[in-house]
Image (spheres, rainbow, N blue to C red):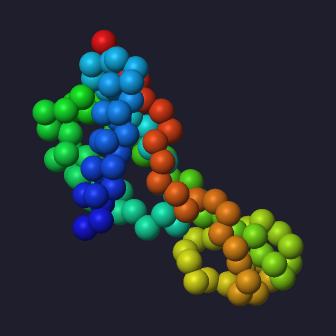
């Protein structure tokens, strides 16, 4: 389950921010996990609950946005929505798609408490 290592990385980012900015805990954490990011959201939520115990992230509300995948089709020169990797362009059926969105996991923002 690579979501556990992802949760550990998110926790490290939050703890670094807490040290740098001097806040005590996180009230709300908002993440973005694109449809093409390869992240199982329920597993990530569970992993975050586990790694957050005893940290500034414990008890935080975790919101996860899941934007659709996007790709540039080199055949029809259009930006198209991509539902999964390895599929043809939904407009022209071509196979030359270059992913350009919805493929990342990132921390968007957080609300913190002193």
Q: Is residue 81 visible?
A: no
Quadrant of residue 75 within the rendered picture: bottom right
- Which residue corresponds to the image point at 55% horizontal and 62% vertical from the top-left? 103
Q: Can you give x and y, in whole percent of width and height, for residue 80 in the image?
A: 73, 68
**Left or right, 109 with reference to 75:** left
Q: Compared with residue 50, is residue 71 higher up or lower down, i.e. above or below? A: below
Location of residue 22 in the rendering, given as x and y in whole percent from the top left corner: 34, 17
Q: Is residue 82 above or below residue 114?
A: below
The extreme front residue here reads 20
Point 16% across, 47% down: residue: 50
Q: Nearer the viewer, residue 14 or 92?
A: 14
- Res 73 quadrant in image: bottom right
Q: Residue at x 30, y 42 (%)?
A: 11
Above or below, 36 against 53 in this view is below
Q: Is 108 left or right of 5, judged from the image as shown?
A: right
List x then y, in percent, for residue 28: 36, 29
Please tell me which residue lies in front, 85 or 24.
24
Q: Is residue 56 visible?
A: yes
Q: Could you tell me how many numbered marks the image carries?
A: 0
Instruction: Identify the image quadrant of the N terminus.
Output: bottom left
């Amino acid at each position: 389950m690579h979501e556990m290592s992802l949760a550990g990385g998110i926790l490290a980012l939050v703890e670094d921010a807490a040290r740098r900015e001097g806040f005590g805990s996180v009230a709300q954490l908002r993440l973005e996990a694109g449809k093409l990011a390869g992240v199982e959201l329920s597993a990530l939520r569970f992993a975050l609950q586990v790694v957050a115990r005893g940290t500034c992230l414990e008890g935080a509300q975790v919101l996860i946005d899941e934007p659709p995948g996007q790709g540039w089709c080199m055949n029809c020169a259009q930006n198209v929505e991509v539902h999964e990797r390895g599929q043809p362009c939904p407009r022209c059926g071509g196979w030359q798609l270059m992913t350009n969105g919805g493929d990342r996991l990132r921390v968007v923002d957080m609300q913190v408490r002193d």
